[in-house]
Image: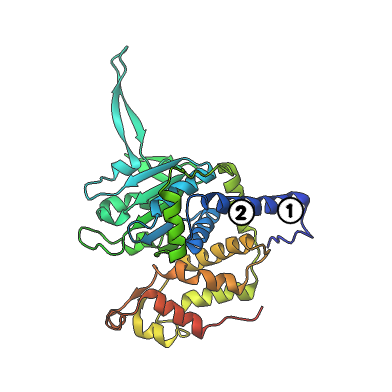
Amino acid sequence: MSTLNPQNEPDVLKARIARFRQVDEQIVSQVRRVIIGQDEVLEQVRIALFVGGHCLITGLPGTAKTLLVRTLADVLGLQFKRIQFTPDLMPTDITGTDIIEEDPTTGRRTWTFVQGPVFTNVLLADEINRTPPKTQAALLEAMQERSSTVRGNIYKLPAPFFVLATQNPIELEGTYPLPEAQLDRFLFNTLLDYLPIEEELKVVDLTTTTHVAKAEVVTTAEEILDFQQLVRMTPIGETVARYAVELVRATRHRDPQAPDVVKKYVNYGASVRAAQFLVLSAKARALMKGRYHVSVEDIRALYTPVLRHRILLNFHAESDRLTPDDVLKQILEVKPGPRE
């Protein structure tokens, strides 16, 4: 297993680690020019970026979901496109389509592929739960395979490719909840809540004057791809990795080690992909925190956002008004983790 101990690694690797931390600090600094508060949300979005995963952002209207994504794309120097999901949106509106073009000199007609908005680096899928499942499914291949198939032809997407989808949790009429297969493609389900009063006052001061906040570019696409490889090189001890897998397995009511709260309230637990994402995101968080190995703290800190959209509760949980976060919190209480 690769190790990131700077005392034992060549100068090139030490420089890569130093650059990673420098860029991460600059991303936070630049985003803070435009976005006030939401520290936990910003951390999770950065982790998803460094892992190469996708993020589902759930928040009430007016909580700066769209502004956060656009600002992040500006800071990263990446190509940004936005899709406003509506009930009449078609799959080809996302992937692109073939059109017939006629050569004016020869009169010969040929098929030409016109790329859709999915061919970008940062894709904002705004209000993704407002479009029917057929159109939502058009994103599945792009998110998992980093490619798009149109009329039997496979087109590779640019790298890096990063989907940030937003959804409104309170309006149920006229919406189509994301199916479990698509939810599982998202690394995080990040919740945006209202700001504290002091931060809300700062937002009002920042946005009701003639001052226009603007973030500057701090990195490149090539550098981000290098950071994603660096994250995967971060070592994780066997006991910490086992703890991560045990936490995921604890969400499955058929597992012998499942807590009573899971056996009572959970219909379906998280898949193996949840364990993969939990370890990968913990590796990114460890580097961001200035450590060269994954700790139990990293696993526990990211457990809820990684798994809250991967477990299905039964009617007992609904009648007792329990949410996935409540169940996951109780799992963490009964499984404190090994000593490091």
Residue bearing the label numbered 2 = 25
Place residue 181 in its image quadrant.
bottom left
The structure's colour scheme is rainbow
Q: Tag 2, which secondary structure?
A: helix
Name the front one of labels 2 and 1: 2
- Percent position (x, y) of residue 210? 43, 42
Contact between labelled residues 1 and 2, with CB atoms less than 8 Å apart: no
Q: Mark 2 belongs to which amino acid? A: Glu
Q: Mark 1 belongs to which amino acid? A: Lys
Q: Which of marks 2 and 1 is nearer the N terminus?
A: 1
Q: Residue at 34% of width from left, 45% of height from top?
A: 83
Q: Residue at 54% of width from left, 63% of height from top?
A: 281
- Along the viewing direction, whichever of 20 and 259 lies nearer the viewer: 20
- Percent position (x, y) of residue 155? 42, 40
Q: Distance between the residues labelled 2 and 1?
A: 17 Å
Place residue 97 in its image quadrant.
top left
Q: Residue at 42% of width from left, 53% of height from top?
A: 164
Q: In this view, does 337 lie above or below 295?
A: below
Q: Tag 1, which secondary structure?
A: helix
Most distant residue in the top direction: 105
Q: Can residue 251 be seen in this view?
A: no
Q: Quadrant of the C terminus?
A: bottom right
- Along the viewing direction, whichever of 115 and 334 lies nearer the viewer: 334
Q: Quadrant of the N terminus?
A: bottom right
Q: Kindly identify which numbered label has been placed on residue 303.
A: none
Q: In this view, does 335 lie to the left or right of 288?
A: left
Residue bearing the label numbered 1 = 14
- Percent position (x, y) of residue 85? 29, 49
Q: Can residue 224 be seen in this view?
A: yes
Q: In this view, does 303 lie above or below 160?
A: below
- Percent position (x, y) of residue 311? 38, 72
